[in-house]
Amino acid sequence: MLKKITSTVAGAFVFIIAVNILSRGLVFVREILFAANFGLGPDFDIYLVAAVFPITINTIILYLGQNFFIPTYNRIKATDENSAASYFKFMLTVFVAAGLVIAAALYFFAEPVLSNYISTTDAQVLSKAVNIFSLFLITIPLNSAISIIIAYQHSEYEFKYPAISRLFLNFLIIPVLILFAGEIGIYTIPIGFVLGTLTQLLFLIFKGKIKLSFDIINVSNLKANFKYLDLSILSILLIETIGQVYMISDRYFFGQVQQGGISALSYAINLFQQPISIVALALSTVIFPKFSENIQKGDYKNFQKNLNDVVNVNLLIFVPVAFILFFYGDVIIQLLFERGKFGSADTNMTFLVLKAYVISIIFYSSYAVANKIIYGAQLVNTLLIITIVGILLKIGLNFLLVETYQQNGLALASSVSYIFFFVAAFIVVQIKLPVDIIKVFSKGFLFYAVNGLIALVLADILITGFDNLLLQGILKILFFLFVFLMNIKITNHNSLQLLNDLLKLIKTSKAK
């Protein structure tokens, strides 16, 4: 039954949404444990700085595998399925080998890299950072294999195992934190990450029936597959590398923000990314192969329909999310994190950072869709230019804003660059492809934004007078959502029909 449900785009989307909700729920539990055990303390700041390079590299590898492998694999498979299978094995070998080389190089240069990045004369602080850094390096070759296996399974429209595999990371981190945080402190985090990544890889190999072999490493196979490694992989590598500079550039200002400022950025960006990871990435994951296929076939009628559906579903979810996080984010932070070493002052600091991020969430989630369209249309060099300009904007604004606004300035700089990505990418899609993405977005955004304003005003007027401010905040959020959805129902907006269509497709797939 599970295979039938995930065999359609709609079914796969809802299945991934369900798994992502569970996954992000585990992340919430993880972040709650982080807050309770480490708060905005110095050890957590050290971990965030030490882990940023390995985590960033892993993210780059994951996106590089998907954005390069899927279009190339589909192109090869269209002419020769045997060559496509050989190409998968070749890329798996290449990525694992590259991951081993990167990890080994960073291990030998760990201390000079971190000593230049962490402005401290405390040998114990530097030693702790190096140890955390070294533990995280173990995940790089493992994640390299995971990246290609997931990309391969997505190419074959197999979404369930990659989605489920993401759960293992936090399944392992949470018990390690609970059992050992009191004994080994901050080291529980990298150890949990290593165990979780290894378990994820083993699950993907076993459930995906991946046959590992190194027969690809011979002259004939190398010659046959090296021809597919064109310059586009370098452009994609640059795009993904530049796009991940955000965390690195923020943590460069470790000594120029308030104590706990880096930790506040981490908690806030995790809240910001929760709905993006659950919804926007699920949408782009399941629709990317379809976008790529529609473009390759020149089927722009279905392409426009898929585009309309994705943009409207994205707005339906992210407009109310933006209102809730911006106006009631302190309630959510207090509810989730305010316990143990995480106090009310920490809530206030984190909420201000969150507000700076949230002003861009609607646009950034929409950019995730446009990004996949540009990859599917193989306009990689155009995306590279957008990415370079966006990150230069981010870095410039970091230096400009950090002195006055500290961690809030760093978050605001990110939001401005995210909005730039959205505007530039939408213009490119509008100009380069025979579809109308700007009109679809503008029309939907106007409706949902007005609806959100009405719901917000009614919630603030009608839900007042409670002695317990936390309870009052929770009730305001629930009433806001109720009014928002009722307005859609009353106006008979087509977003409800779209959701009904998705559910019908899932029911149909169950019946087959």
Image (cartoon, rainbow, N blue to C red):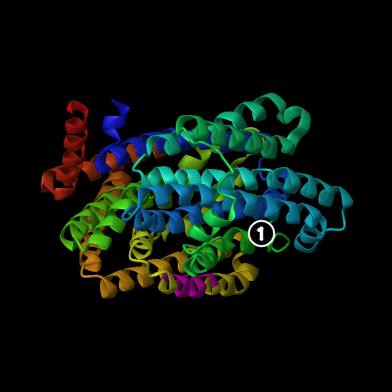
The chief SS type of the magenta part is: helix
- Give the image quarter of residue 339: top right
Evaluate whether residue 19 shows in this view. yes
Q: Is residue 25 above or below residue 96?
A: above
Task: From the top left corner, tell me how far across and down residue 497 is, in percent.
Answer: 14, 44
- Segment tinted magenta in the rendering: 383-391
Nearest the viewer among 135 and 461 is 135
- Which part of the image, by quadrant, shows the C terminus? top left
The answer to whether residue 388 is magenta is: yes
In this rendered view, identify the residue nearer to me: 431 or 375: 375
Residue tagged 1: 251
**For this rendering, which residue is in front, 281 or 201?**
201
287 vs 382, left or right, is: left
x and y percentages locating residue 491 in the rendered image:
12, 48
**Residue at x 62%, y 68% (from the top left corner):** 402
User: Which image quadrant: the N terminus?
Assistant: top left
Q: Is residue 442 left or right of residue 471?
A: left
Q: Is residue 282 above or below residue 361?
A: above
Please tell me in which quadrant of the rendered image residue 16 appears: top left
Q: Secondary structure at mark 1?
A: helix
Q: How many marks?
A: 1
Instruction: Classify mark 1: residues with Cα within 10 Å, few (<14), some (14-19) or many (20+).
Output: many
Residue 393, percent across and down? 52, 74
The three-letter amino acid code for the residue at tag 1 is Arg
Q: Position of residue 488 (x, y in %)?
A: 17, 46
475 in the magenta segment: no
